[in-house]
Image (cartoon, coloured by chain):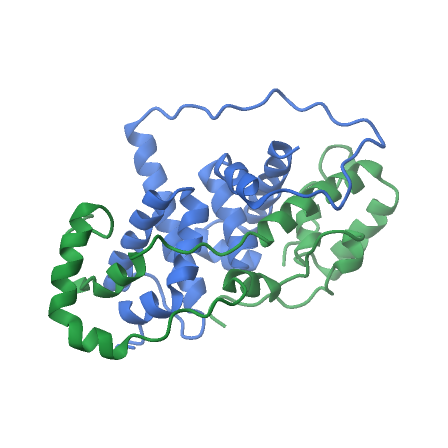
Chain colours: A blue, B green
Amino acid sequence: MTGSGVPTWEEVARNHGRFLYTVAYRLTGNDDDAQDLVQEVLLRVRRGLGTYQPGNLEGWLSRIATNAFLDEMRRRRRRVVELLPDEPERVIPPEPGADVAAEAEALPDDVHRALQRLTPDYRAAVVLCDVVGLSYEEISATLGIPIGTVRSRIHRGRAQLREALT
Amino acid sequence: MTGPAAPDAGGHLGDRLSGLLDGELTHAGAEEARRHLAGCPSCSGELRAVDNARSWLRHLPAVEPPAGFRDRLLAADPSLVAPPGRAAVVPLRGRRAAVATVAALAAAAAAVLGLLPAPDPPAEPRVTRLVEAHATSGQGADPLSRLVPVGVPVSFGQ
């Protein structure tokens, strides 16, 4: 640790490399963008951005990674007209009784692909909740949005994911 | 904690279902939700669907970086990075990365090799361990029976 308490990049790379890469990969969807995102996190850690509170390093790294991811998504939107994802027709609600069993399985690769179909805002909320494990309060602080919005994005993100895997 | 909030159209639970699954409703809100679920097949169905998605996401495995990436990270000297802006003075992927890595490693070989720890243990994905610290989740069984009691959320930085 440096004198200021901010972790060194060496510590981050050695002890939290897989965690950081996992978050980056789930947010961006592919290895190239994930590596770019991790590199951006390196820059921001070096600049000491954000308020680091000892004892929650991975939460702090998630915050930096997610905000860097969303910044990049906003940057891209300004440059390129974003093509709408290939959405399926509005799903007709299943007949009563024809519901999917609670033990329905889904392959991780399919889940990952479905995750990438979410809009960045929904994907970020879902990743922070279900991949990183942050509380709504932590996600609210991370993204700078009200807790009600956190809950709404998580719920809609999960619902869209489920639809995509039906 | 998120409060009960106004019911959505038809008095259904909407995103309070996720709040319930995540242990983020108030005690009163959770009780109200359970009462509603007991008599609402639509919300019960939605609860199962959202719980499926939640479980699948929480069981996603950790992802290993491509071969050599962690070494390139360790070798990347932050002082080489040109602030501000995103100029990638230290490329971490691609052919240029290999050249930069060799040079950086040569300069730092003694110190780096002496301090490199053992490889990450091939244990369960630590991401899964992180998630397990929060509300219980898992495949099968009635989602309501696996809910943890409403408690104080972990504050950021704890």
Front residue of B96/B80: it is B96
Residue at left 79%, top 53%? B141
In the depicted structure, whether residue B142 falls above or below residue B114: above
The residue nearer to you, when weighing A162 against A157, is A162
Q: Nearer the viewer, residue B56 or A109?
A: A109
* Residue B124 located left or right of residue A45: right
Residue A153 pos. (x, y %): 56, 43
In the rendered structure, the answer to whether residue A68 lies left or right of residue B2 reads left
Please, which residue is most extreme toward the top here? Answer: A89
Instruction: Give how far across and how far down residue A163 sits, in percent.
Output: 64, 33
Q: How many marks?
A: 0
- Which image quadrant for residue A42? bottom left
Residue occupying image coordinates x 15% and y 71%: B108
Residue A157 placement: quadrant: top right
Q: Quadrant of the C terminus of chain A?
A: top right
Q: Is residue B143 visible in the rendered structure shown here?
A: yes
**Quadrant position of the N terminus of chain A in the picture:** bottom left
For the point 53% across and 67% down, the residue is B155
In this rendering, would A58 be left or right of B1?
left
Residue B67 in the image, given as x and y percentages of width and height = 33, 55
- Which residue: 68% across, 67% down? B151
Up-down: is A160 above or below A136?
above
When the figure is inspected, residue B113 is found, relative to residue B66, above or below; the finding is below
